Image (cartoon, rainbow, N blue to C red):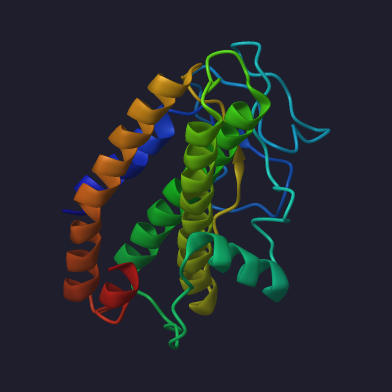
Amino acid sequence: MHSTIVSAAFVAAVVVNAAPSAYGNPGHAERELQLGSSSPSGQDGPSPTATSSSSGQTPFTFPLPNGFPNVDNVTLRSIEEQAHGTLPNGALPTKLNQKSIATLELIAFNEIFEVAFFTDLIANITSGVSGYSIDSPVLKAFVLRTLTAVQAQEELHFLGANGILASAGQDQIQPCQYVFPVDNFDDAIRLASTFTDVVLGTLQDAQINFATDGDAELVPLIG
């Protein structure tokens, strides 16, 4: 079952070109993966230290305009409002077994990839980048409203997984630089559907791992 969770993170990895970002402290996410091509970069553009990928396109980099992945309480409240939900407010574990640590690292790695993906998609639609134009203003507003909620939900998922790791005294996952292998809206949605299906199909395995490895208190958090 643990290998199934690894496969979910692998799907996230193979659809991006993820190189270590200059932003943040070193963490377990800083592993080079040379795959994919790109749509244009995110809302706030590449960091000054970003370099072009092998495809010649500029990778998406963090932080976001709201400071994510480093956020204060005011920003967190704003993210929660956009997500139509909140982080869990119960006590977090102060120790984890090694399998649970690996599972949470993979979850956090996947969640911050999804934040990057949806942020980039929102920016492309908003800017009317070729391949991402939506002619109907009503439909465009609906799509952007929906994707903004999804983006915020992924931010919370990442902050939640990293928060558990931090509470247990473990290294937190740091952002990479991301290049996505899509260049139009339809392909972006198809890709999002694929990685969402894979993730939803593996979270049950994560819960079973937690329940059988002595970290059962994580089951409702992940659920």
Q: Indicate whether 78 appears above or below 105.
A: below
Q: Nearer the viewer, residue 20 or 130?
A: 130
Q: Residue at x 47, y 19 (%)?
A: 182
- The outermost residue toward the bottom is 91
Q: In this view, does 27 lie to the left or right of 101?
A: right
Is 147 in front, or is 26? Answer: 147
- Quick check: can you spot residue 128? yes
Residue at image coords 37%, 58%? 102
Residue at the spot x=50%, y=29% of the render? 33
Where is residue 169? Give x, y as percent.
Answer: 53, 75
Q: Quadrant of the C terminus?
A: bottom left
Residue 87: percent from left, percent from top: 48, 73
65, 11: nearer the viewer: 65
Q: Is residue 2 left or right of residue 144?
A: left
- The residue drawn where x is 46% and y is 46% is 146
Q: Can residue 171 be seen in this view?
A: no
**Residue 110 x/y as whole percent:** 43, 47
The image shows residue 208 at horizontal and vertical percentages of 17, 66
